[in-house]
Image (tube, grey):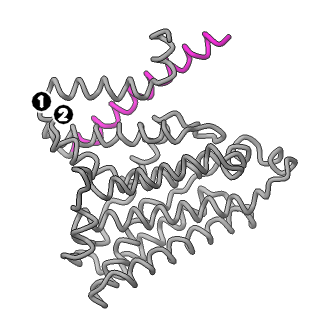
Amino acid sequence: MNIGKILRERNIIVVTLVCCVIFFLISPRFLSVDNMSAISRQIVPIGLIALGQFFVIVSGNIDLSMGMASVFFAVLLGVFFGLTGGVGIGLLAVVVASLTMGGLIGVLVAKLKLPAFIVTLSALFMAQGLSGLVIPRGQQIFLMGGFFQFAGSQKIFGIYLSFLFLIGLCAAAYVVYNHTRIGAAIIAIGNSEENAKLAGINVDRVKIGIFMFSGLCSGFAGIMLSTRMGFVQPGLDGNGLLLDAIAAIIIGGTLIQGGRGTIGGALWGIAFIGIVNNALNLLNVEDVWHQVFKGVVILAALGVNWLLWQSKQSEAH
């Protein structure tokens, strides 16, 4: 294949690899095995949120609640652990609550035709408020031993178990998205709801299912967030996780208007965001400049992505 064609079709891979080289030249520790392992663990909550958000965005919608919802579900797990001393009931409560929340959002969007932006923004505020009600602000619940240590620190062949869980879920999502009628229906809805209905697709049912999966991914992200940190508190930055997840999806080539995107591209976008976050910490960038530098790097990546895409389109014509 022509090198230029490879660059255009795999632009996010090229951008990510270039950033890795730059960060390595600045700090050789960046490409160490320990640091790469740390990145794989750090991106798990972002990756889970991004996976759920991917399906929502491809369908032509948005879910602003996922970040704060993940914090609420982490808090919910911590509270059940504190009350019972075990995690079984807490994990079940998180799964049920996340599916219920996603289902309710889906019904409001699909059946009542309310804008997803407004519905999920309201859910964001409710999740944030409920987190503060369950655990008063400033207090923490520490999650020690057992499940939390195993899920947060256990490795298989040198790879964190939590990262393998993310990859496994992404693999399942890939099969559903690319090789089932559900995936085709999601893409069709993102391109045109009216045409999807004419094609015999039950648009309302698919939308509700998408938001239920989005809610479930938020629940999984909350669980993994709690196992990584070892404690939960209501003041965690859920919105930061959400913005990183959305940035990852868009950088990975998903069209924000819906109808186009790939699981592989989303995964590379997640890796890119994780690399940038890690590099900024490794280079001791001050917190006040952290978001500024990350914004510049993301904007530059999007610019390169867009230029390569335009080049591909020009060659096609």
The residue lying at 58 percent from left, 50 percent from top is 55
Asked whether disc 1 touches disc 2, contact meaning CB atoms under 8 Å apart, the reply is yes
User: Does residue 117 lie above or below 16 as drawn?
Assistant: below
Specify few, some or many for label 2: CA neighbours under 10 Å numbering under 14, 14-19, or 20 or more.
some
- For mark 1, give the secondary structure: helix
User: How far across and down, in percent of the image, does residue 100 sit?
Assistant: 57, 75
Give coordinates of residue 192: x percent, y percent: 76, 43
Q: Nearer the viewer, residue 175 or 300?
A: 175
Magenta run includes residue 205: no
In magenta stretch: residue 308: yes
For the residue labelled by badge 2, is the local secondary structure a helix, a strand or a loop?
Answer: helix
Identify the residue at the far right of this view. Answer: 198
Q: Which residue is mark 1?
A: 28
Residue in front for this viewpoint, 165 or 288: 165
The amino acid marked with disc number 1 is Pro
Q: Which residues are magenta?
A: 288-317
Estimate how packed mark 1 is, as few (under 14), some (14 to 19) or many (20 or more) residues with alpha carbons within 10 Å: few
Give the quarter of the image for residue 302.
top left
Quarter of the rendering containing residue 23: top left
Residue at the disc numbered 2: 31
Residue 231, which numbered label? none
Magenta stretch: dominant secondary structure: helix
From the viewer's perspective, tell me whether residue 238 is left or right of residue 121: left
Residue nearer the viewer, 235 or 205: 205
Residue furthest front as drawn: 157
What's the residue type where badge 2 is placed?
Leu
Residue under the image location 21 percent in, 37 percent down: 279
Q: Position of residue 312 (x, y in %)?
A: 57, 16
CA separation in Å, label 1 and label 2: 6 Å
Residue 12 sits in quarter: top left
Q: Is residue 148 above or below residue 211?
A: below
Q: Which residue shows up at 33% across the image and 31% down it?
A: 296
